Image: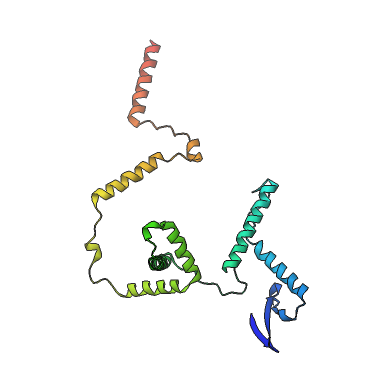
Amino acid sequence: MTDLTTNDTPSTLIAIPLKNGAGFVDVDTARLPDDVYREALLQGLKVIAERAMSKITKEAYPDDAERKGAIRAKAEANVEDMYQGQVKITGAVAIKKASGAVMTEAMRLARNLVKDAMKASKIKISTVKASDITVAAKQLIANDPSLVTTAEANLAKRAETPAPISILSLVKPDPDLVAKAKAKADAVKAEKPLSKTQAGKVAPRAKAKPEAVVAHAATAKGHSGHTAH
């Protein structure tokens, strides 16, 4: 959008993208009559309020009342996203998704900022759930993308600056802890119920060992010889 000023009257010129790549058409909202402006705003807000509802179908919600309730709940969530500024902006430049390592570092930075704010407000960190701090940190990153930029810079600097000593020579897996971790994993695996596919499988018949086959054949031959007598 481009802000214009004509005769001290603020005006906003909006470039509307046309279908089939036909370009754009400019609309000066200051020149729209009130009822037309209201209709344009209504239609635009309706589109945003009804976003991300493709999965709310008759198949997913056979009950009509339940389906309408789901639609309304999603619309209210979309409206809340509008208030928070968390709406996909048409024509906005897509931001490159940060890697897992970068986001881990960004979350570390954001959590520290949240904790600093808590300390400044005399709030003991031990009295706040870790999950709440995580939610606040994620919101902080969403509102301040510079944290991701700082995280990328931190990782790049670490990669360029090798550790002065061999860290792996100082830390070794403890055999007891390794054994405990394996025992815990085995216990979880043993308690895990079989899936429907596994439960429906029939155990394959064990193949007889060659020695057993020979012994069985010899026994059968002996029985047939006795019968002949």
Horizontal and vertical percent for residue 63? Answer: 68, 45
* Horizontal and vertical percent position of residue 123: 39, 62
- Residue 16 is left or right of residue 124, and the answer is right
Task: Locate the N terminus by quadrant.
Answer: bottom right
Closest to the observer: 124 or 178?
124
Q: Residue lying farthest top? A: 229
Does any portion of residue 26 appear in the rendered image? Answer: no
**Residue visible at 38% across and 39% down?**
190
The answer to whether one can see residue 15 in this image is yes
The residue positioned 70% from the left and 72% from the top of the image is: 20
Between 119 and 153, the residue placed more toward the observer is 119
Residue 17: x %, y % from top left: 68, 75
All told, the count of numbered labels is: 0
Relative to residue 17, is residue 156 drawn left or right? left
205 over 43 or under it: above or below: above
User: Looking at the rendering, in which quadrant would you find the C terminus?
Assistant: top left
Observer-nearest residue: 78 or 173?
78
Left or right of residue 77, residue 163 in this image: left
